[in-house]
Image: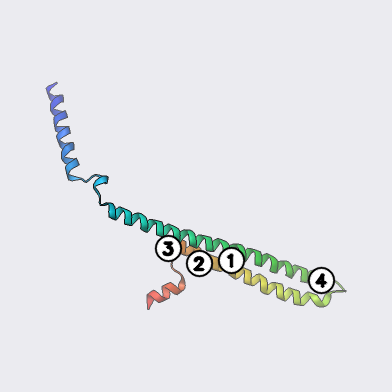
Amino acid sequence: MHYFSSLLFILGFSTSLFAQNNPSPTSLNQDSLRAEIMQLRTELEETQTNLRISHNRFRTGILTSAIGYSIVILGGVLGGSEDYAEWGQPLIFAGGVVGVAGAIFIFNSNTYIGRAGGIPSRRERKEDER
């Protein structure tokens, strides 16, 4: 029994020493915690903004591509008919241009996903190299 009480005393004494040497979370500087929280909020808002822009550009690109390639199909169908054959080639060309523009929107939307992940754009990397 004497050994047990000695062990409890040593354990209690060492715990009190440990508590004195290590600051508790409540004793940390509240200003630095607030600054860290504000920085995290700012980064979160930037990430959400970049994802929102990426989403909108991606949707625009999908819609533009769908319309463009639908025009290409329409041009192909009209090009095969006898009555509207003169409309076929211009519609195929115009639809192709619109479809490629949509593909460019889709490709460029990935830039904002990269920014949300912390990857700088090509322009920013070139400016950093200078």
> Residues at badges 1 and 2 in contact (C-beta under 8 Å)?
no
- Residue 118 lies, in percent from the top left, at 42, 63
> Secondary structure under badge 2?
helix
Q: Mark 2 or mark 1, which is nearer the start of the sequence?
A: 1
Residue on which disc 2 sits: 111
| Neighbour tally class for label 2: few under 14, some 14-19, many 20 plus, Cα within 10 Å | some
Q: Is residue 49 left or right of residue 40?
A: right
* Distance between mark 4 and mark 2 Cα atoms: 38 Å
* Distance between mark 4 and mark 1 Cα atoms: 28 Å
Please state which amino acid type lies under the numbered disc 4.
Leu
Q: Is residue 24 above or below residue 93?
A: above
Q: Label for residue 106?
A: 1
Q: Mark 2 or mark 4, which is nearer the start of the sequence?
A: 4
Residue on which disc 4 sits: 78
Kindly indicate the quadrant of the structure image that contains residue 85.
bottom right
Please state which amino acid type lies under the numbered disc 3.
Gly
Kindly indicate the quadrant of the structure image that contains residue 14.
top left
Q: Is residue 55 above or below residue 104?
A: above
| Neighbour tally class for label 4: few under 14, some 14-19, many 20 plus, Cα within 10 Å | some
| Neighbour tally class for label 1: few under 14, some 14-19, many 20 plus, Cα within 10 Å | many
> Residues at badges 4 and 1 in contact (C-beta under 8 Å)?
no
> Secondary structure under badge 1?
helix
Please state which amino acid type lies under the numbered disc 1.
Ile
Q: Is residue 10 left or right of residue 67?
A: left
